[in-house]
Image: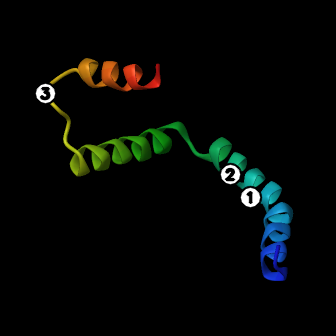
Amino acid sequence: MSDPLNQFVENWRAVGPLLEAMRERDLIDTPLPVAMAQLADMVDSAIFLKPLLPSSGMVEMQQVLARLR
């Protein structure tokens, strides 16, 4: 690996645990109503960007599973 790439990897090794600790602290400290509102906003955004289909999705899921076989 090149020197800048090695430095990049080492930086992530050093910072990774700190970022994980921050993420866990945010998850613990976020009140449930706030988390639920954020989740609802994410779902609304996803539905806006790709509206739900009128079908249950069962046929599509069967196609995906058939490809995995």
Please rate how many residues cluster around mark 2, counting C-alpha atoms within 10 Å: few if below 14, some from 14 to 19, many from 20.
few
Q: Residue at horizontal 24%, vertical 51%? A: 49
Residue drawn 35% across the image and 47% down it: 41
For label 2, the residue is: 23
Residue of label 1: 19
- Which is more foreground, mark 3 or mark 1? 3
| In the foreground, 6 or 39 | 6
Amino acid type at circle 3 is Pro
Instruction: Give the spatial CA distance, label 3 vs label 2.
Output: 37 Å
> Where residue 38 appears, x then y in whole percent?
43, 47
N-terminal of the two: label 3 or label 1? Answer: 1
Q: Helix or strand or loop: what does disc 3 sit on? A: loop
- Relative image position of residue 43 (x, y in whole percent): 34, 42
On the image, the x and y values in percent for residue 23 come to 68, 51
Residue drawn at x 86%, y 64% is 14
Mark 1 lies on a secondary structure that is: helix
Q: Residue at x 80, y 64 (%)?
A: 15
Tag 1–tag 2 contact (CB < 8 Å): yes
12 or 28: nearer the viewer: 12
Q: Secondary structure at mark 2?
A: helix
Q: Disc 2 residue type?
A: Arg
Which quadrant would the N terminus be assigned to in this image?
A: bottom right
Residue indicated by mark 3? 54
Q: Residues within 10 Å of mark 1 (few under 14, many from 20)?
A: few
Q: Position of residue 20 (x, y in %)?
A: 74, 52
Query: Are the residues tagged 3 and 2 within 8 Å (C-beta)?
Result: no
Task: Assess disc 3: are there few (<14), some (14-19) or many (≥20) residues with their C-alpha within 10 Å of its C-alpha.
Answer: few
